[in-house]
Amino acid sequence: MTEFVLLKLFEQTFFLCLLLSAPILLLGMVVGVLISIVQTATSIQEQSLTFIPKLLLTGLAMIWLAPWMLARLMQFTTQLLGQLQTFAR
């Protein structure tokens, strides 16, 4: 395994991690900002008000995106196992 192959494998793995985590993180960020704006406008400073909706929406997003995430992981794993022979050299 050359340095180029190892770097390419790291790049693909890192990109897949970013691709799989980005929708959930972005949803949590948007919900957090919206709730913070509502809290600022209404002067309500309850900590659980931001935590519970973000937790629920993140969980629902994970359930909704699970088939897509699993398909991407299976595709990457199949590709990785298909190239296993070239990695062993």
Image (cartoon, grey):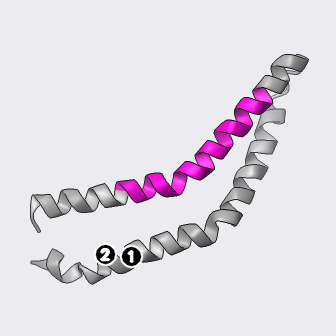
Determine which of the numbered discs, if any, sits on residue 88 in the image: none
Horizontal side of 70 relative to 44 (left or right) equals: left
Whether tag 2 and tag 1 are in contact, CB under 8 A, the answer is yes
> Is residue 15 shown above or below 27?
below
- Three-letter residue code for mark 2: Leu
Residue positioned 59% across, 51% down in the render? 23
Q: Position of residue 82 (x, y in %)?
A: 28, 83
Q: Position of residue 80 (x, y in %)?
A: 31, 75
Q: How many marks?
A: 2
Q: Residues within 10 Å of mark 2 (few under 14, many from 20)?
A: few
Distance (Cα) linking label 2 and label 1:
5 Å
Location of mark 1 (residue)? 77
The magenta stretch is 14-36
Horizontal side of 82 relative to 73 (left or right) equals: left
Q: Quadrant of the C terminus?
A: bottom left
Location of mark 2 (residue)? 80
Secondary structure of the residue carrying tag 1 is helix
> Is residue 72 shown above or below 16?
below
Residue positioned 45% across, 51% down in the render? 18
